[in-house]
Amino acid sequence: MKLRNRNLDPERIADFECFRSGILELIVKNSPLNEVLNEIVLGIETLNPTMICTVVLIENSKIKIGAAPSLPKIYNDAIEGVQIGPETGSCGTAAYTGKRVIVENIETSPLWKNYKEIALRVGLLSCWSEPIKSHTNEIIGTFAIYHHEIASPSEFDIFIISETADLVSIAIEKSIVSTKLTESERRFRDFFEKNSSVMLIIEPNTGEIIDANQTAVQFYGYPHEILIKMKITDINMLPEEEVKQERMRALSEERSYFSFPHKLANEEIKQVEVYSTPIETSNRHLLFSIIHDVTERKIAEEKVKSLLSEKEMILREVHHRIKNNMTILFNLLDLQAKAQENEHISNSLKDATSRIKTMSLLYDKLYSGKAVHELRLDEYLIPLSQEIISLFPYQVKLETDVISIQLTSEQLQAVGIITNELLTNSLKYARDPSKELEIQIKVWKEEDNYHLFIKDNGKGFDTQMSNSENLGFGLTLVNMLTTQLSGKLKFQGNAGAEYNIVFPINRTRH
């Protein structure tokens, strides 16, 4: 408290300071608000017996009596609930304007025209009122001093009314905070004690278990009185220093999720997930932890991992055997082709070996490398085309422009065999010794379709081949696979061979 006027009576100031100290002690002890307000009013009346004091609270812009032990009940009842405004007595007007209101004579004051009858009936002739403001400058009440005589305030009276209003403000705001805190703690206590999840409150520095809910008691198997005397390191199976480091991370909010092994009273080890966050209560920082038992889930995850590992091992073995069988079949057909004197039969066997080679490459890509759902067309088609060309003993200029799209294994297989047939056909029949053979392979998306385009700069072919009766086995196979893709095949041979296969992006399954 800072006094603005040093001329005030030191003895009276000392008496007020003594009174003020007693009130502050009540506030610190969390005494009920009505008790504190009554002590304030009675204390001021004791310091000056000619005064009749009251504390008015403002709720929803209406007057509510906070403390008025010396005023007649009939008067208190008359002003209870009155709406504050510019002419509602000293208190209603002070609350409305936010300024001190001094009425020396209630009978003649225009502010009292609607309330002077009841005031005069109980012998109240003057009223001075000071607005009580919160720390945010909101009007939360008024402190008023009445007299049974017409009176104007002295300098000390102004000091008393101003300082007392500040004291009441402290009491009211402390009560509001305490009420909110008590309600918050009650809600938290209900949430904590009745929750079906395992909950602990832990002292972060020492690891002491401050509290545990009933679910935690049932989960860990210790009586509540025993559990709250334990440390979390009696439960957590990790090294003590490591557990403390994790608590510090939770306290600093660096981390909030942890996975620990916890030991129950029966020595059983449970795998738990802990969600921990700092809370402040009773002026100290604690950790509020929610514990979930994930033992069964962890066991299931390990089983799944084991089964997946076993499945992968079996698949690797199956893939290895299938690949070996394909290689054996390829070699057998290749030997048969080389040993065959009939050139037509030999060429047919070589075509078959080429198709098996294509299938083997596709199988390698689908099952020995990335997962099927990860294989993209460009990663499959470009290496396949390069490998087919490498089987022929002359230089070929290959130009590829293939979009990176994901296709099903059935689509990849069809596109791979189509490419093999058409590319092999160009390598066999399109080459002109006078110039370098050039082959283009392109795949692009257009509206709702994919386009596979293969072209060479070779000799071309007779357009009469477009008659289905004249198609060789290779083109018959290409036509069949195009139908499998729900697509359409177009080709021409006027200036080199040119093939365009169009198939839908979302193929309808039958």
Image (spheres, helix red, strand yellow):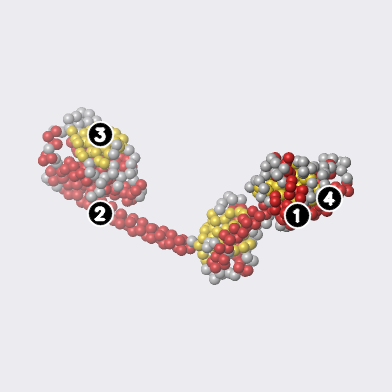
The residue wearing badge 2 is 325
Q: Amino acid at mark 3?
A: Ile
Looking at marks 3 and 2 on the same chain, the residue that comes earlier in the sequence is marked by 2
> For the residues carrying marks 3 and 2, which lies nearer the camera in this image?
3
- Judged from this view, the residue extending furthest toward the bottom is 266
Looking at marks 4 and 3 on the same chain, the residue that comes earlier in the sequence is marked by 4
Q: Amino acid at mark 2?
A: Asn
The residue wearing badge 4 is 50
The residue wearing badge 3 is 439
Quarter of the figure with residue 493: top left
**Residue 250 seen in render:** yes
> Looking at the image, which residue is at 26% across and 45% down?
507
Looking at marks 1 and 3 on the same chain, the residue that comes earlier in the sequence is marked by 1
The residue wearing badge 1 is 72
Q: Is residue 85 left or right of residue 107?
A: left
Of 243 and 458, which appears nearest the observer?
Answer: 243
Q: Can you give x and y, in whole percent of width and height, for residue 435 in the image?
A: 22, 29
Q: How many numbered discs?
A: 4
